[in-house]
């Protein structure tokens, strides 16, 4: 059974390869979805996959890559159907 979660990651998470690293971790775990920067300095993602894989990618998101300093991860229910994991363009304020 696949599950989907929406994440908003705050802290020092832009400019430290957070998105690329999340893409690599998603591929390793067989997770689909997307990730993008937001203009407020956070990183947003929707992750979809088997419950154990989603738990693992959420655990990873709380650490991030070595240069990141994650302060908080907000987790909500995700939506949509995804066949792969993608890196999306930055979301501007007001979108």
Image (tube, rainbow, N blue to C red):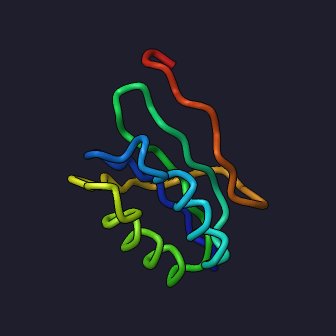
- 5, above or below 52, in the image: above
- 55, above or below 11, in the image: below
Residue at 29% over, 45% down? 12
Residue at 48% over, 59% down? 5
Q: Residue furthest top?
A: 94
State how many labels appear: 0
- 19, above or below 88, in the image: below
Residue at 45% over, 78% down? 56
Q: Residue furthest bottom?
A: 52
Q: Nearer the viewer, residue 6 or 10?
A: 10
Q: Residue furthest left?
A: 71
x%, y% of residue 30? Answer: 67, 76
x%, y% of residue 4? Answer: 55, 62
Quarter-of-image position of residue 14? top left
Quarter-of-image position of residue 83? bottom right
Q: Residue furthest right?
A: 83
x%, y% of residue 66? Answer: 36, 65
Residue at 46% over, 44% down? 44
- 83, above or below 79, in the image: below
x%, y% of residue 29? Answer: 61, 78
Quarter of the figure that contains the N terminus: bottom right
């Amino acid at each position: 059974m696949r599950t989907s979660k929406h994440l908003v990651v705050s802290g020092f998470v832009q400019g430290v390869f957070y998105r690329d690293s999340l893409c690599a971790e998603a591929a390793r775990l067989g997770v689909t979805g997307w990730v993008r920067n937001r203009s407020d300095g956070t990183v947003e993602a929707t992750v979809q996959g088997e419950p154990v894989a989603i738990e693992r990618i959420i655990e990873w998101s709380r650490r991030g890559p070595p240069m990141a300093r994650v302060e908080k991860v907000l987790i909500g229910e995700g939506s949509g159907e995804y066949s792969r994991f993608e890196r999306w363009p930055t979301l501007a304020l007001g979108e």
